[in-house]
Amino acid sequence: MARRKVAQLNALIAVDKPIGVTSHDVVARVRRAVGERRVGHAGTLDPLATGVMVVGIGQATRLLGMLTLDIKSYVAQIRFGCESVTDDAEGEASREVPVDACLFEESFARDALARLLGDQMQTPPAYSAISVDGVRSYKRARAGEDVELAPRPVTVHAAELYGIAHEDGAPVWTAGFTVSKGTYIRALARDLGRAVGSAAHLVALRRTASGSVGIERCLALNTLSVDIARASALDPVAALDVPALVLSEAQVADVLCGKVVAPHGELPAEGARVALVREGTLVALGEVACGCVRPRDVFPQPIEGVRL
């Protein structure tokens, strides 16, 4: 078996996904830009959507399933008067209703958005990447199958009206949402339309934050390079939201061999997960055990971007 090539970059970055490309396309473009095959992302965005995507490069791909990115923020544009089969502007119209004048009133819109707040069960769009018996839901829907996905618990933490536009006689609400991981804004738009006695679908979406990573941290894909990615790497310790302990040079060698170490500094509680760092890099993740730290996830090529 051929040995994997040593990565020239091991880092988490945030990119501003352009409209019209898939999340898979973003990964492919990052691979070309940094010359590294091992690239992945945390949190899919539909082709229609733009905004924050957290991307792992090299060893940092191992962190993607551990990141604390449970809260997402979006700015959405929702058009009333029509539902679509995909719950967004890419699908054919599935239901049309006359537009009520109240949908142009900001006070009505604010009240309707306020009623979305809190915990709820949401039925995901049929055209989604959720697997049904091993097949993506959107593939079944495109094949003409009648797909009914089970409702899932989600939380809407904030829903704020930014404005109402008039487009060809239809109201388009621009609203900001902060929601739990796994919430479909397309489905939120669909359900909002039904809740106000109308029909609605999503016409534009921008993710403005994923966990603690805001849009201001994002890099443009068309100018991305190894140097730019390295200079703008996300702090993996902050992204993981775990305490950090600094290793000595000798302890780095021990950790890379899987040995238990006793880093300088106050240890968190027994069983807590900690980051083991050295000179701006993440060397390993470990677990506190009997007054020491036992390495659990060791990165032979340390992950860059640590800022203590």
Image (cartoon, helix red, strand yellow):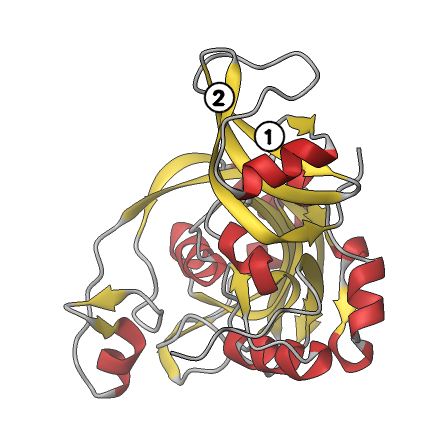
Name the image quarter holding residue 61: bottom right
Report crowding for label 1: few under 14, some 14 to 19, many 20 or more residues within 10 A (C-alpha). some
Image location (x, y in percent) of residue 272: 48, 21
- Please tell me whether residue 286 is drawn above or below residue 279 in the rendered image: above
Q: Give the numbered dot on residue 82.
A: none
Which of the image's four quarters has the N terminus? Answer: bottom left
Q: Is residue 232 left or right of residue 188?
A: right
Q: Secondary structure at mark 1?
A: loop
Q: Is residue 149 left or right of residue 232?
A: left
Residue 116 appears anywhere in the view: no
Answer whether labels 2 and 1 touch (C-beta < 8 Å).
yes
Residue drawn where x is 22% and y is 60% of the image = 149
Which of the image's four quarters has the C terminus? Answer: top right
Q: Amino acid at mark 2?
A: Ala
- Please tell me whether residue 246 is drawn above or below residue 6 in the rendered image: above
- The tag earlier along the polypeptide, 2 or 1, is 1
Residue drawn where x is 54% and y is 71% of the image = 38
Q: Give the numbered dot on residue 242.
A: 1
Q: Which residue is mark 2?
A: 272
Say which of 17 and 203 sits in front: 17
Q: Amino acid at mark 1?
A: Val
Q: Is residue 17 left or right of residue 125?
A: right
Q: Is residue 154 left or right of residue 44?
A: left
Name the image quarter holding residue 178: top right
Residue 181 appears anywhere in the view: yes
Q: Secondary structure at mark 2?
A: loop
Residue drawn where x is 65% and y is 51% of the image = 302
Q: CA distance from mark 2 to mark 1?
A: 9 Å
Image location (x, y in percent) of residue 251: 64, 32
